[in-house]
């Protein structure tokens, strides 16, 4: 996201004074990686055309899109200030992420420091003997009051690292030097430096780059084709690409997951040896499609709190179920529209989301708006008091899309809503105000959606799956599975409690389960009905009991051996399936076809 900070200024000066003093500053950065095995970046920041006796530099406390305070400054070391001819200057830390630098009349100041980089996360920073990857929030502070100034970055790389991939613009005739029009754009452009693989394609005259670091077993030509298919589908829906070029940065890792969106790039981590499975390809498609749709939803059209906002604190919004959840909705829908999934594969994915949400007790008392607002908070009992606004927002997006189509006889869609939002609110315009998303839906659909939003977004009523899926000639089927520890609301893992003695450690107890108030997290389950229980026998031992019967258990709770029991409830695993109704009307089929293909009915 494009970000704008309103923050404290240098001591004794107002914001207006600081901005006036900083209006002519020339700011540049240089980053080195001469000893990559130490995980240490060497950074130089130069500030020129200074006129004030002092200025402040400040590190962000979080990386946009990550929605968590990480305090990147914690890894900064050996921070020094000097004139450009080497005279040391006083740099005083005035806050955990802020230094005040005394200029002593110098009109150019150089700041040098090192940053430890061993956080291989899409929102983080990493350096080792294979590559350099960084988000600018972890490496580069801004001059307080001068975030609107253009910046340049010089990258000093080892000769063997032949490629630099970033969304920033290269500076003509200056090798390995890049520019950005302001600090916000600068740190919204992650950088990968290594001997990584690079693939390219063009669509509608816009170049796209795919950078892949790390060994893997994905078919690279198929990789390129599928990314291109997703790009084509989304660009066609939104009416064109709002950038000159776009860069996908993939890191192939032993257990890689996640992605982070940027204005004209994305960073994605994936499992390196999953290319021989359809599950691996599905996960690759899913995160790629999700992050690419973010270039519109969040990066250019967003609720007011997400732009401009403050780097120095939490920035909550009630609309992440739209910004993230509906990005997930369109991410998966465009996999279908791009021809990479069949109808049945898409139905299967949406049914799995229904199963996920219905398995969360918090859906009964936490509205989607509250789930969005609370994303910065990580409750210790998260499984019982929270759920993913990605999941519920995705499902709300699907139901809202079908509801709009039904009310308008397939003439208007959620696609139209996002095109409307883009036209009315896209950067550099302000984001939509509170209630703005609902207002956009009503304006596009020409219908009152107060009840829909009050019941399913601001309220906690169960989502109307059957009714709304029926508009598209679809059925939601429920099927009870076998009784398992999951159906009892338990999460367990094996635990060595003595040599050659293994117990089952309870890691979570669902608040709507028969085990709640009987078992607690960290209990070690030893026996059921007097017989030793193992991971292999747990399901069979539970199956011996019927609903209403007492299940005696022996557990270690800390150092105590306890005998407890619970009354078994009829709560087997529930599975869901979305299927096409063979008796669907021509109108229902037409709505379904237009929805899944993106073509008008």
Image (cartoon, rainbow, N blue to C red):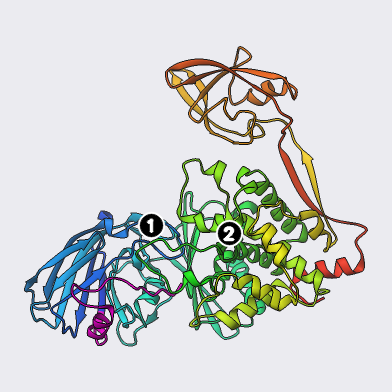
Using the rendered view, name the quadrant where residue 446 is placed. bottom right
Please say whether residue 15 is one of the residues in the magenta stretch. Answer: yes
Labels 1, 2: front one: 2
Please say whether residue 357 is one of the residues in the magenta stretch. Answer: no
Residue 351 visible in the picture: yes
- Residue under the point 32% across and 83% down: 150
Q: Residues within 10 Å of mark 1 (few under 14, many from 20)?
A: some
Q: How far is disc 1 from disc 2 in space, using C-alphas?
A: 21 Å
The C terminus lies in which quarter of the figure?
Answer: bottom right
Report whether 219 appears left or right of 412.
Answer: left
Which percent across, then down, holds residue 164?
A: 38, 72
Vertical placement of 15 versus 382: above or below? below
Vertical placement of 451 versus 14: above or below? above
Residues under numbered marks 1 and 2 in contact, where contact means CB atoms less than 8 Å apart:
no
Vertical placement of 473 versus 7: above or below? above
Nearer the observer, 69 or 137 = 69
Report whether 193 appears left or right of 597.
Answer: left
Q: Which mark is residue 585?
A: none
Q: Secondary structure at mark 2?
A: helix
Q: Look at the image and give the residue range highlighted in magenta.
A: 1-27
Determine which residue is flagged by label 1. 69
Vertical placement of 494 versus 527: above or below? below
Q: Residues within 10 Å of mark 2 (few under 14, many from 20)?
A: many
Using the rendered view, name the quadrant where residue 442 is placed. bottom right
Determine which residue is flagged by label 2. 369
- Residue under the point 42% across and 18% down: 559
Which percent across, then down, holds residue 389?
A: 58, 56
Give the residue at the far left of this rendering.
Answer: 87
């Amino acid at each position: 996201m494009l970000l704008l900070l309103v923050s404290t200024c240098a001591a004794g000066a107002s914001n207006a004074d600081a901005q006036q003093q900083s209006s002519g500053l020339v700011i540049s950065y240089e980053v080195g990686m001469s000893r990559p095995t130490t995980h240490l970046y060497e950074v130089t920041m130069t500030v020129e055309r200074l006129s004030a006796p002092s200025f402040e530099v400040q590190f962000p406390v979080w990386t946009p899109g990550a929605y968590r305070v990480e305090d990147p400054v914690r890894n900064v070391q050996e921070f020094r200030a000097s004139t450009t001819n080497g005279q040391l200057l006083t740099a005083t830390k005035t806050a955990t992420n802020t230094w005040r630098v005394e200029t002593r009349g110098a009109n150019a100041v150089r700041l040098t420091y090192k940053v430890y980089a061993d956080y291989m996360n899409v929102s983080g920073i990493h350096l080792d003997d294979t590559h350099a990857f960084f988000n600018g929030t972890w490496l580069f502070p801004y001059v307080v009051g001068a975030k609107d100034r253009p910046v340049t970055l010089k990258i000093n790389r080892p000769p063997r690292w032949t490629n630099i991939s970033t969304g920033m613009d290269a500076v003509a005739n200056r090798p390995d030097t890049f520019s950005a029009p302001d600090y916000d754009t600068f740190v919204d452009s992650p950088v990968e430096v290594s001997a990584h693989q690079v693939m390219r394609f063009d669509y509608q005259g816009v170049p796209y780059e795919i950078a892949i670091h790390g060994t893997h077993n994905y078919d690279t030509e198929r990789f390129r084709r599928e990314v291109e298919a997703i790009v084509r589908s989304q660009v066609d829906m939104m009416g064109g690409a709002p950038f000159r070029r776009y860069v996908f940065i993939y890191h192939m890792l032993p257990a890689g997951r996640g992605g982070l969106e940027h204005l004209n790039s994305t960073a994605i981590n994936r499992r390196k040896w999953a290319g021989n499975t359809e599950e691996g390809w599905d996960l690759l498609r899913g995160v790629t499609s999700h992050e690419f749709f973010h270039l519109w939803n969040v990066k250019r059209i967003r609720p007011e709190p997400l732009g401009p906002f403050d780097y120095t604190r939490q920035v909550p919004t009630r609309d992440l179920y739209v910004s993230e959840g509906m990005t997930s909705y369109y991410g998966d829908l465009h996999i279908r529209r791009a021809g990479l999934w069949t109808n049945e594969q898409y139905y299967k994915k949406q049914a799995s989301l229904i199963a996920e949400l219905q398995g969360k007790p918090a859906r009964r008392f936490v509205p989607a708006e509250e789930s969005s607002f609370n994303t910065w908070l990580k409750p210790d009992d998260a499984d019982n008091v929270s759920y993913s606004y990605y999941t519920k927002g995705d499902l709300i997006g699907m139901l809202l899309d079908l509801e709009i189509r039904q009310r308008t006889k397939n003439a208007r869609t959620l696609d139209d809503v996002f095109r409307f939002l883009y036209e009315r609110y896209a950067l550099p315009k302000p984001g939509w105000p509170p209630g703005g998303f609902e207002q956009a839906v009503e304006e596009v659909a020409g219908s009152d959606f107060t009840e829909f939003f009050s019941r399913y977004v601001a309220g906690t009523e169960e989502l109307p799956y059957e009714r709304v899926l029926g508009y598209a000639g679809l059925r939601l089927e429920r099927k009870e599975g076998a009784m398992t520890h999951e159906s009892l609301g338990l999460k367990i893992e094996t635990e060595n409690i003595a040599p050659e003695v293994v117990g089952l450690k309870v890691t979570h107890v669902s608040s709507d389960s028969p085990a709640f108030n009987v078992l607690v997290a960290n209990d070690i389950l030893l026996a059921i009905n007097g017989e030793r229980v193992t991971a292999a026998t747990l399901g069979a031992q539970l199956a011996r009991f019927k609903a209403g019967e007492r299940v005696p258990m022996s557990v270690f709770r800390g150092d105590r051996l306890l005998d407890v029991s619970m009354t078994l409830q009829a709560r087997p695993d529930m599975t869901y399936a979305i299927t096409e109704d063979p008796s669907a009307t021509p109108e229902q089929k037409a709505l379904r076809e237009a929805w899944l293909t993106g073509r008008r009915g």
